[in-house]
Image (cartoon, helix red, strand yellow):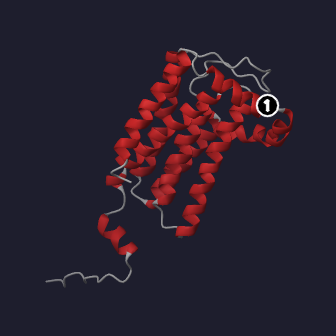
Amino acid sequence: MARLAPAFLLGGIVAVIGLAMLVITDASDPFDRAIIDAVRDRDVSNVLAFLGPVTELGSTGAVIVVAMLTFAVGAAIGPWRLGLIGAVTIGLASLGVELVKSTVARDRPSLLEPIIVEHGFSFPSGHATLSMVAYGVLGVLVSRSRLAPALRTAIVFALGVLVVLVGASRVWLGVHFPTDVIAGWIAGGVVAVLYASLTRSVSREPAVAAADADQAAPRSDPPAAG
């Protein structure tokens, strides 16, 4: 995974820039229209009605709570810098989203009447980006914790599903185009992978991690005093 990280980061950045160019030139309109029409079909829309409350899990308030939880989890698994860097990463990602929104300056969808009203620019989706960053960073910390492997996997999987649902909710609500959400997921994923890569060196000491991984490994006693 560590060797794949640079390629993923570069590919993600290129993908977001590519999507931005498609948006600016209106080349993404047919794709966006097809997805929005499908999601807002009456039968499909009724099934997706549960996404209304789910969208709040990607709101600014929810992300702040996750940032605080990230700091707490990082401090618990040690070193505490893991949590601090995670919380700061989430905050910086929020500023980055606003910068990109202002640069691309895409208006909100007007194809259908939105279920809720949102103001500001549309690309990328802040909810999709920040939920990917916040829950992604939290997932990295959980994966490095000493919880049982099955529990770690279940939590990380649940966080991933949550990110997908938050992004989908933005399209269903009519406040974002699908390409806004896809760009948000990719950008957030890049930030989460960058966090994982940069904090690898401040994870638990290699010797401790190795001992945890191999309980049968021989251990030397500390030298006697004197």
Residue at image point 42% right, 30% down: 14
Q: Please determine whether, in this image, residue 186 is positioned above or below residue 206.
A: above
Q: Is residue 125 visible?
A: no
Q: Is residue 119 left or right of residue 211?
A: right
Residue at image point 80% right, 20% down: 113
Identify which residue, 80 or 46, lies in the foreground: 46
Which quadrant of the figure contains the N terminus?
A: bottom left
Identify which residue, 13 or 125, lies in the foreground: 13
Residue at image point 53% right, 21% down: 22
Q: Residue 209: name its quadrant.
A: bottom left
Q: Mark 1 = which residue?
A: 40
Residue at image point 60% right, 51% down: 159
Q: Residue 223: name its quadrant.
A: bottom left
Q: Please determine whether, in this image, residue 13 is positioned above or below residue 80.
A: above
Q: Is residue 8 left or right of residue 113?
A: left
Q: Residue 59: name its quadrant.
A: top right
Which quadrant of the figure contains the C terminus?
A: bottom left
Amino acid on which the number 1 mark rests in the picture: Arg
Q: Secondary structure at mark 1?
A: loop
User: Among all residues in the image, which is located at the extreme left?
Assistant: 226
